[in-house]
Amino acid sequence: MDKPKISVLIPLYNRKQYAVQCIDSALNQTFQEDYEIIIRDDCSTDGVFEFVQEKYANQISAGKIKLIRNKKNWGEKVNVNKLIRDATGKYIAFLHNDDAYLPHALQHLYDVAENFNADVVHGSGCLIFPEDDSKIFVSETYDSVISKKVAVMSDIPSERFQMWLRGEIFWDTQYNLFNRNFMIENEIFNGEASGDPIFLSLWWTMLAKVFVKTPVIFYVRRKRPKVQLTEKEIPRGIEEVISVEIEMSREFNRLFNKVELLKNNEEYQYMAKAFTFCVRESAWIMHKEIYRNGVTPEIYNAVKNTFKKYFGDDYYYPMFLFNWAHVMPFRRSSYIINYNANPAPPSR
């Protein structure tokens, strides 16, 4: 039996209200070639797994949809890694479980990938709609934009790097079609930091032999509301952010050794790490306003324990710098110590 041309991978976790819109958009494609849809549920708690199992029973029975449930909640990173191993298609596409494809998505991506023998086909734009919007309105038809040129990105490493550094590509994987062999051979999704889109995007930007950018919009992303972590969730969130970034710093070396431009260039290595950390800090710490109440005892202990794990007794100064950097945007220097939470500050 021939392998499918494309594997559409949907990591599933809750958000049951968007399941039909997401899955139907993958099923109702103009693509006439064989493709598979693989859905991995990471132990959802809102009944979405059972809902999909019943709603798409015919497609599951026919083998069009493969529905798998993890034995326990592994988290998005592990879930995506497992999906890649589940895939059998020549190409891999990612679809978030609350987003949707436009009808021409797979046909266009496949045509471009085959015509250019591309490792990566990258989308230049997407449609964005509010979280509660139940309808998708297409601003341009496939026929009206197909005449726009598909661009093959420069194969000069320094130009590729600058393109990534200037933010001229979408970091998230769902705006791309990947050659599966390219991903596996380059171990792009291996390692502790493999779930981070900024880190990953540098990998495939620098390692793809043929990197193609298309102007055709094919993806609809749902605007998600700003989410603040609860006080109970903050310590674990901080521990995860720091651990991932330290592990990521180490894993960068694997990439640097694969790319001659980065291998012995300390300036470029610094820029790659600094840019990634800045964006991550903005998204995971500042955007969620984790330090909105200053350095609480919970934050203090979480930061302390995490840095101590990596630096031993030398954790004090990195811990201070981390806390200081994140309280500064709130423009209250006293937040470096939360006096409300610690009623007995050091004597002056």
Image (cartoon, helix red, strand yellow):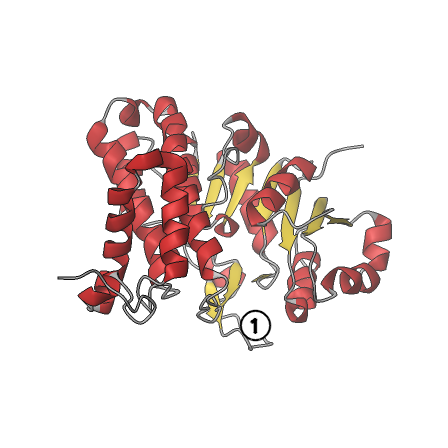
Q: Which residue is mark 1?
A: 136
**What is the quadrant of the N terminus in the image?**
top right
* Three-letter code for the amino acid on which mark 1 is drawn: Ile
For numbered disc 1, what is the local secondary structure? loop
> Does residue 42 lie above or below 134 as drawn?
above
Crowdedness near tag 1: few (<14), some (14–19) or many (≥20) residues, C-alpha within 10 Å = some
Task: Identify the residue at horizontal 43%, vertical 36% (top origin).
Answer: 204
Task: Please provide percent x and percent y for residue 346.
Answer: 21, 60
The answer to whether residue 93 shows anywhere in this view is yes
Task: Please provide percent x and percent y for residue 231.
Answer: 46, 66
> Does residue 14 lie above or below 133 as drawn?
above
Residues 314 and 217: in front is 314
Q: Image check: 28 left or right of 106? A: right
Residues 152 and 321: in front is 321
**What is the quadrant of the C terminus in the image?**
bottom left
Kindly indicate the quadrant of the structure image that contains residue 310. top left
The answer to whether residue 151 shows anywhere in this view is no
Task: Identify the residue at horizontal 86%, vertical 57% (top origin).
Answer: 58
> Does residue 66 lie above or below 208 as drawn?
below
Residues 112 and 27: in front is 27
Task: Please provide percent x and percent y for residue 18.
Answer: 64, 68
Q: Image check: 244 left or right of 294? A: right
> Does residue 47 lie above or below 265 as drawn?
below
Task: Identify the residue at horizontal 26%, vertical 62% (top origin).
Answer: 337
Task: Please provide percent x and percent y for residue 243.
Answer: 43, 43
